[in-house]
Amino acid sequence: MTDPWYLVSAVAISAAITWTLRAAPFLVVGQLRRAALVRELSEQLPLGIMIILVMYSVGGLGISSLSEGAVTAASLCVTVALQLWRRNAALSILAGTAVQVTLLSSLG
């Protein structure tokens, strides 16, 4: 049978490592907010994420699925139009997703 002190020390070490790893981001957040790289990423990432989502959505289309392509094109147009109009990425993505899901479910 395993020694109880061994088990207690293993749990204590695991808890200390877990606590340290969870606390570490809060200890360095002030330094990260002042970093030029983080500011640059915060400006560039939303556009990059939108490009990745578009490529993922359009990349899976086949030539034979013309109706699905039309649905994707319509939802993409809604997403782009809302983004240009309201400048709200969450609204654009949610509305485009809702249009695509609604139209795809009507195709059956």
Image (tube, rainbow, N blue to C red):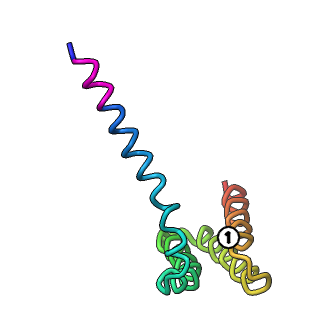
**Residue type at numbered disc 1:** Ile
Left or right: residue 2 versus residue 42 is left
SS label for mark 1 = helix
Q: Which residue is mark 1?
A: 93
Image location of residue 86, percent across then percent down: 79, 81
Question: Quadrant location of residue 4?
Answer: top left
Left or right: residue 41 versus residue 95 is left
Image location of residue 1, percent across then percent down: 20, 12
Instruction: Look at the image and say whether residue 7 sits in the magenta stretch.
Output: yes
Q: Is residue 81 above or below residue 53?
A: below
Q: Which residues, given as a range, are shown in magenta?
A: 3-9
Q: Assign the magenta stretch its main secondary structure.
A: helix
Instruction: Look at the image and say whether residue 13 sits in the magenta stretch.
Output: no
**Closest to the observer, 87 or 37:** 37
Q: Is residue 36 above or below residue 4?
A: below
Q: Is residue 26 above or below residue 14?
A: below
Image location of residue 49, percent across then percent down: 54, 75
